[in-house]
Amino acid sequence: MLRNSFIIVNIYLYLVKKSRNYSVMKKLILVLVVLFSANVMVAQSCKSKSTCKTKTVCKKDSYVLNNGLIEATLFHKNGAVAQTGFYTKDNKLQGEWISYDVKGNKTAVANYNNGDKVGTWTFYQGTTQKEVTYKDSRISNVNTWEKTDSRMVTN
């Protein structure tokens, strides 16, 4: 859309230079205002739930300084939390990071130490659960489980 606007503006500028007509210049200004307004309207795809027919809810990612770390909460386009975790002041991942799908289901739990992958990470995909153990930021072990039964035992 923006590229098309530049092409149209260049054509009008060419015509204005050729004609030196003030009415053409007024039309050019009007076209520029309309194109700018259209670009602004297209850029604002996030709408409130009450006014959007597609039920799109946009939330801005948040970054809050908390005990020397930056606490991050990232969102999907539908407003559901996508990831939570921490950064150091040097923009390195730190501590536990949790990822969620657009429905809010947990998809991964990861651990970082000053940007390095550490400890055991857990990945969830349907009925499969994988545990990946990291040592020196490299995979050292992988275990996979398949959920086949959901019975509960009680006394």
Image (spheres, rainbow, N blue to C red):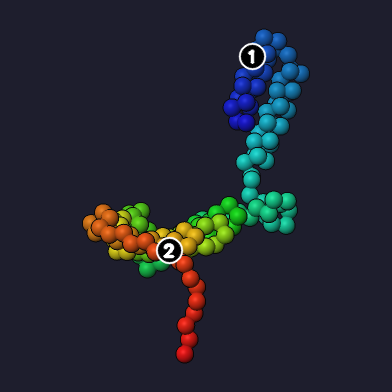
Mark 2: amino acid: Glu
Local packing at callout 1 (Cα closer than 10 Å; few below 14, some 14-19, many 20+) is: few
Q: Is residue 24 visible?
A: yes
Residue at image location 33% in from the left, 55% down from the top: 92
Q: Is residue 43 left or right of residue 27?
A: left
Question: Mark 1 sits on what residue?
Answer: 14
| Label 1 or label 2, whichever comes before in sequence order | 1
Residue indicated by mark 2: 146
Check the picture and name the quadrant holding the N terminus.
top right
**Element assignment for label 2:** strand
Relative height, residue 8 to residue 89 (above, below): above
Q: Residue furthest top?
A: 18
For discs 1 and 2, the disc positioned in front in the rendered view: 2
Residue 23, percent from left and from top: 76, 18
Image point 41% across, 60% down: which residue?
A: 123
Residue 60: x %, y % from top left: 55, 55
Q: Determine whether, in the image, residue 46 is placed left or right of residue 30.
A: left
- Identity, as a three-letter code, of the amino acid under mark 1: Tyr
Neighbor class of circle 2 (other Cα within 10 Å; few <14, some 14-19, many 20+) is few
Q: Position of residue 70 (x, y in %)?
A: 40, 61
Query: Which numbered marker is on residue 97?
Result: none
Residue at 47 percent of width and 83 percent of height: 153
